[in-house]
Image (cartoon, rainbow, N blue to C red):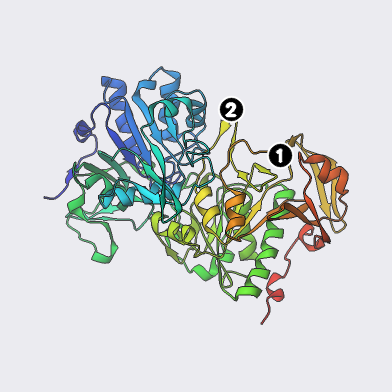
Amino acid sequence: MRPEIVEFGDMSFLDCVKDRSVLAISGFNMATTPEYLIKSLYEKYTSTGHPKSLFIETDALPASSGRALDAILKDAYENGNEDFIRGMLVPFMGFSPWLQRMTVENSFQVYGWPIGITAYWFREIASGRPGLLTKIGLGTYLDPDVDSGSLNEKADEAKECTISKFSISKESYLLYRSPKPEIAFVRTSFSDRYGNLTMDDEPIRGTVMAITQATKARPNPGVVIAQVKKYLGDMSVPPRNVEIPYPLVDFVVSSPEKYNWQASSFYYDPRASFKSNPWNSRELPVEGGERNVPQSQQVIARRVAMELISVINSKGPPILINLGVGIPSLISGIISSEELSRNIVSVVESGPWGGLALTGPDFGVSLGAFAVSTIPDMFSNYEGGIIDVASLGFLQVDRFGNVNPSYIPGKLTGPGGFPVIAEGTPRAYFAGSFTAGKTDISFDKDGIHIKKDGDLVKFVNDVYKIFFSGKEAVKYSKEIKFFTERCVFSLDSRGLVLTEIAKGVDIDKDILNKMEFKPVIASDLKETPAVVYEDGKMNLKYAIKK
């Protein structure tokens, strides 16, 4: 039976969403986010009082500030409609200020599994399995011996999402379980005359297929509702272009143009949907995302980019790297400007390979990518250690090398893809400022000049929540380094080792006195190459051994 094609303005398709339904929603910020479906469902609730007490599961975050999920949460908070949602399984909330606020204020249950875990979980449920069994999360806040994976008290009490620990052949594993989705909201680009769905204009493939299959899986097949930007009428599309075949879809809903943005800052750019030459990506200007990046962040990104050359020289080109949100995402632009795109292939957790990764709320979209994977397939590259390097941000690092990227009391953004990427990669290059808070730091060919330092210490005795376990990394002999604007640390069985400092740094005043613990100081302490503080190209391609 073909899916029902819903005319604009007809909301009867929402009748299948009942009180207490488990609703799966696709979305990586605004990419693949079915904003029209989310908005329409909330409007039905505000006009009728139903459906309410929904449990939402998502692969990443179907929102950006003031858009989609964030917009309805703002209205729910301000108008006392908090019974619309009873709980959420959401990996990231950094670009949804209202979700962050309601999580902190314990408005409803919130569970913070990583992106790769949720994406895999949908695929496992689609296969009829009870949940996801993996080593990811051992020794972190996801490990029941350490914490619960919950992000607030209501989640701790309700336990609708659980993580259990098992031993198989004397090896520890975690089993992630959550309610099976009963309804799915997904977004694609076009529907042909049969109801086959394509993603021609989407910047990512996301997890739409796995979410669809998880919803349709037995023993209780659910309802799949797809938002498209256009119904093609009598046209059909080539089989290889079909992302979701029509037998898996119940309703196809054409939405107004304004609800189909590729990214937070732009509606459509052909380069974001793989319709340009990827090897010309270095010529592509970055549109949207973060601008006016502080010099200290650029310095850190340049130093990490320099470190990648040593990986190329030891392994041989090309190397495969993942770039996280924040400072690491700046490395993509450096790779392009240094003409290293053939030697260093960057992948983003949302699925793109190569190209120029955008930053800020547009993170997840790459201009000029040469390939795009689904999110579950991309995370196989991380969890399986297929990538060579991951560069990720940090908020806190402790004496054991444990890392907290995003959680302090009263403020949290969720794990994102961090735990899976950091734990799976053979080399993790964490990148962040040495202190937090307002600073006055400048750089020139003579090195660093610290006039005013940040007031918040980031290298602490114990992190607030463990998202990356230093102990597990050392156990498996992984290469772990921490890059800041003034120094570099490595991690071994002794803990953090100070291996490099910038010219102009006083070790006692600028480093040791700004840490809660004393690191090991390397006997062959090096000085950061001055080129990272200068403007223009570093000519890194000439450092590659032939």
In the picture, the quarter occupied by the C terminus is bottom right
Judging by the rendered image, the residue that carries numbered circle 2 is 410
Q: Residues within 10 Å of mark 2 (few under 14, many from 20)?
A: few
- Label 2 close to label 1 by CB (< 8 Å): no
Q: Secondary structure at mark 1?
A: strand
Q: Position of residue 315 (x, y in %)?
A: 60, 74
Report if residue 11 is visible in the image.
yes
**Nearest to viewer (mark 2 / mark 1):** 1
Q: Position of residue 58 (x, y in %)?
A: 38, 41
Q: Residues within 10 Å of mark 1 (few under 14, many from 20)?
A: some
Amino acid type, residue under disc 2 in the picture? Gly
- Residue at the front extreme, as displayed: 170
Judging by the rendered image, the residue that carries numbered circle 1 is 460
Horizontally, residue 339 falls left or right of residue 500, namely left
The residue located at (39%, 44%) in the rendering is 176
Q: Is residue 37 above or below residue 44?
A: below
Horizontally, residue 87 falls left or right of residue 244, namely right
Q: Position of residue 23 (x, y in %)?
A: 30, 36
Amino acid type, residue under disc 1 in the picture? Val
Q: 404 or 284, which is in the foreground?
A: 404
Q: Is residue 76 above or below residue 147?
A: above
Q: CA distance from mark 2 to mark 1?
A: 18 Å
* Badge count: 2
Report if residue 262 is visible in the image.
no
Q: 14 or 88, which is in the foreground?
A: 88
- Residue at the top extreme, as displayed: 80
The residue located at (39%, 33%) in the rendering is 88
Which mark sits nearer the N-terminus, 2 or 1?
A: 2
Q: Position of residue 50 (x, y in %)?
A: 26, 23
